[in-house]
Every structure is written in C-alpha cells, then in structure tokens.
Image: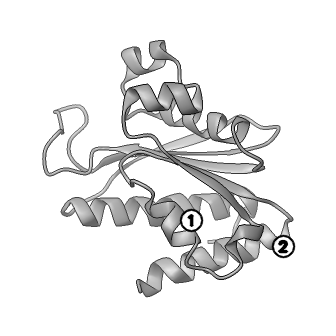
Amino acid sequence: MDAELYEVAGRVADTLKANALVMAAAESCTGGWIGQAVTMVPGSSKWFDRGFVTYTNESKQEMLGVSAETLKRFGAVSEQTVREMAAGALKASHAQVAVAVSGVAGPDGGTSKKPVGTVCIAWCMTGSEPVARSHRFQGDRDSVRRQSVIAALEGLLELVRPGSR
C-alpha cells in the first residue's frame, strides 16, 4: 500500500464525513487512480459516490457533457475541459463535490505548449463554479499520475476546508 496516498485519502474521508459531503471523480490520465485511492479507506461508500474514467474525448462528452467546442478549442488537457468535467461529474452523480483530472502523463504525447507532465485539475462543489489549476509534474508516467492523484485530493481538501493544508 502507498502510505502517502492512504494518508491523504484518509484526510479526505475525515473532511467529507465531518462536512456531510459525498464526492465523485472524473479522471482521464489517472485512469481511476483517484477512485482507487479513496476506496482504500474503509467505509468509503459513505462519502464516495462514483468515478468516471473518461480517457477519450468522446467519453468526456458522452458521460460528463463536456462540449465538443471546448475540446476543439482548448484540447482535452486544459482548465476549461476539466472544469466542465468536474461540473459534469456533479450533474451525473449524487455527490456534492467533484474533482476532475486530465493531463499528459507520458512518455510521449507532449507538445511544446503542453509537454509531458502537464496536468489540469478542477474541483467543484454544488452551487459554485468549478475552479481549476494547471500543474507541471516531473518524472516518469507513474510518477506524473501519482502526483496528479495527490494534488487532486489535496485540492479537494482546500475546497471543502480552506486552510487545511
């Protein structure tokens, strides 16, 4: 077991339970790793509703309602896209808070504007607009994906309980 991921997931569990909130996750480059991390914590069915693994643009559109125009104009790895993914995850679930991730984990697929390690993450709570942040993580594919999961969960903590980090 990954002790650091388990610790962060445990803090997410405690925070969501304390605030009577349920989360959903919309994942692209992390491929379900956020869902796997949070369900390591016993009792996660009380605060984790569902995860969407939307690796293709079509799945982002079909499952989360991301607009074709957003994908065409900004690309799958963009703050605009992950904001729509997070909002779509809320709409398609019973959650009150959602996180969305899309990025270039490597080893290839990067461009000069979006090199390997570029990851966009968004968070959204019911009744508020999604917020997004872009990251540039270093390392191999596994490392970029793991750092993305940690950043996604830590950002969720910030959203639900400002100042928790």
- Look at the image and tell me in which quarter the C terminus lies: bottom right
Q: Residue at x 35, y 49 (%)?
A: 29
- Judged from the image, the secondary structure of the residue bearing numbered disc 1 is helix
Q: Nearer the viewer, residue 48 or 124?
A: 48
Q: Relative to 58, is 152 on the left or the right? A: right
In percent of width and height, residue 24 lies at 65, 52
Residue depicted at x 82% and y 37% = 127
Q: Few, some or many C-alpha atoms within 10 Å of disc 1 (few <14, some 14-19, many ≥20)?
A: some
Label 2–label 1 contact, CB within 8 A: no
Badge 2 crowding class, 10 Å Cα cut-off, few under 14, some 14 to 19, many 20 or more, is few
Tag of residue 18: 2
Q: Nearer the viewer, residue 9 or 59?
A: 59
Give the residue type at disc 1.
Glu
Residue 61 picture location, percent across and down: 50, 25
Q: Residue at x 22, y 59 (%)?
A: 141
Q: Amino acid under label 2?
A: Ala
Q: Quadrant of residue 159?
A: bottom right
Question: Residue 91 in the image: x percent, y percent?
Answer: 72, 35
In the figure, 54 relative to 30: above or below?
Answer: above
Q: Is residue 60 left or right of residue 73?
A: right
Q: Which residue is mark 1?
A: 154
Residue 76 badge: none
Q: Residue at x 55, y 78 (%)?
A: 40
Point out the frontmost of discs 2 and 1.
Answer: 2
Horizontal side, residue 41 vs residue 106: left or right: right
- Quadrant for the N terminus, please: bottom left
Q: Name the foreground residue: 128 vs 68.
A: 68
Per the image, label 2 sits on a secondary structure element best described as helix
Q: Earlier in the sequence, mark 2 or mark 1?
A: 2
In terms of depth relative to the viewer, which is nearer, 28 or 158?
A: 28
